[in-house]
C-alpha cells in the first residue's frame, strides 16, 4: 500500500524572542504575561570546546557523541501558537528568532495537569539533508468489504511515526481499506509510503474491521 494523496505539511509562521533569564522566577513572570517558554534544539553538531560566537539566548550543550549542539531559549506568545497546538494537523514551523529565519518542527509540549495550559514547547531545527522522526495523522479511505458485510471499521492508530527528510513528510498518511474483509486488520508492516520509513512495530494494528453482533448472526446463518 502506498500514499497516493501526497500533500506536503502546511507551514506555520511563528515569531519568537530570545531570552537569557531562564530561572523559575523569570519563567513564572513570563507566563503571567501570556508568554510561553520554548527551546530550539539545533541538529548541526559543533566541536567542543565551542569557539564560535553565541547570540542572545543561545548555549552549547554536549551530546552523547562528544559533540555539542546549539540550544536557544526563547519565548512565544500564547496567541501566536494557539493554532499550532490545538489542532490535529502537523506543521513545518517557519520560525523567526532574533531576526533569523529557521525551519523547525514541534518536538514536545508540556501541559499544566489541571488547566491544560501550555507550559513549555520544544522545537527541533530541520535541514534538507537530515532525516527527522515525526508523528503523522492517519486517514482511512474507501469502503471496506468487511463493512459491507456488517462489520465496523475501527482506526486503532491515529498517528504513525515516520522517519524522513522534512519535505518528504506528508500532512497525512492515507490508507485504503477497500479490500479489508470482516475480522481482518491492516498492520504497519503491510504499509509502504515513498520516501518514508515507518518506525512503529510492524505487527502494530493500524485499522481493523471488527465483527458486530449482527455480522456474527449473519455469518452463523450463512454457515447453516
Image (spheres, rainbow, N blue to C red):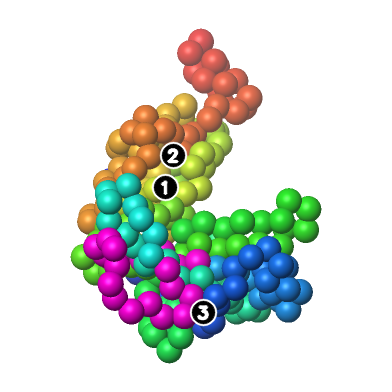
**Disc 3 to disc 2, how far (Cα)?**
41 Å
Q: Earlier in the sequence, mark 3 or mark 1?
A: 3
SS class, disc 1:
strand
SS class, disc 3:
strand
Q: Residues within 10 Å of mark 3 (few under 14, many from 20)?
A: some
> Going 42% across and 68% down the picture, which residue do you hit?
59
**Disc 1 to disc 2, how far (Cα)?**
9 Å
Q: Are marks 1 and 2 in contact (CB under 8 Å)?
A: yes
**Disc 3 to disc 1, how far (Cα)?**
33 Å
The mark found on residue 206 in the picture is 2
Asked whether the viewer can see residue 45, the reply is no
Horizontal arrangement in the rendering, residue 30 relative to residue 137 (left or right): right
Taking the magenta stretch, the answer to whether it contains residue 117 is no
Q: Which residues are magenta?
A: 39-59
Residue with the mark numbered 1: 160
> Going 56% across and 63% down the picture, which residue do you hit?
121
Residue 54 against residue 193 in the figure, above or below: below
Q: Residues within 10 Å of mark 2 (few under 14, many from 20)?
A: many
Q: Residues within 10 Å of mark 1 (few under 14, many from 20)?
A: some
Amino acid at each position: 500500500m502506498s500514499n497516493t494523496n501526497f500533500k506536503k505539511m502546511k507551514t506555520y509562521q511563528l515569531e519568537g524572542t530570545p531570552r537569557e533569564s531562564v530561572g523559575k522566577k523569570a519563567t513564572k513572570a513570563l507566563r503571567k504575561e501570556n508568554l510561553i517558554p520554548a527551546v530550539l534544539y539545533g541538529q548541526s553538531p559543533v566541536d567542543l570546546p565551542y569557539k564560535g560566537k553565541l547570540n542572545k539566548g543561545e548555549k552549547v550543550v554536549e551530546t552523547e557523541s562528544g559533540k555539542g549542539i546549539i540550544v536557544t531559549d526563547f519565548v512565544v506568545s500564547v496567541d501566536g501558537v494557539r493554532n499550532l497546538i490545538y489542532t490535529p494537523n502537523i506543521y513545518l514551523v517557519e520560525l523567526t528568532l532574533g531576526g533569523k529565519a529557521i525551519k523547525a518542527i514541534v518536538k514536545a509540549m508540556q501541559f499544566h495537569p489541571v488547566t491544560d495550559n501550555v507550559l513549555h514547547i520544544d522545537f527541533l531545527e530541520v535541514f534538507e539533508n537530515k532525516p527527522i522522526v515525526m508523528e503523522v495523522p492517519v486517514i482511512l479511505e474507501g469502503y471496506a468489504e468487511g463493512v459491507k458485510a456488517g462489520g465496523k471499521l475501527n482506526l486503532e492508530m491515529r498517528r504513525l511515526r515516520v522517519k524522513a527528510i522534512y519535505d518528504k513528510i506528508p500532512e497525512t498518511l492515507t490508507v485504503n481499506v477497500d479490500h479489508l474483509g470482516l475480522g481482518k486488520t491492516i498492520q504497519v508492516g503491510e504499509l509502504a509510503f515513498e520516501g518514508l520509513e515507518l518506525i512503529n512495530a510492524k505487527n502494530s494494528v493500524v485499522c481493523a474491521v471488527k465483527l458486530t453482533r449482527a455480522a456474527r448472526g449473519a455469518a452463523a446463518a450463512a454457515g447453516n
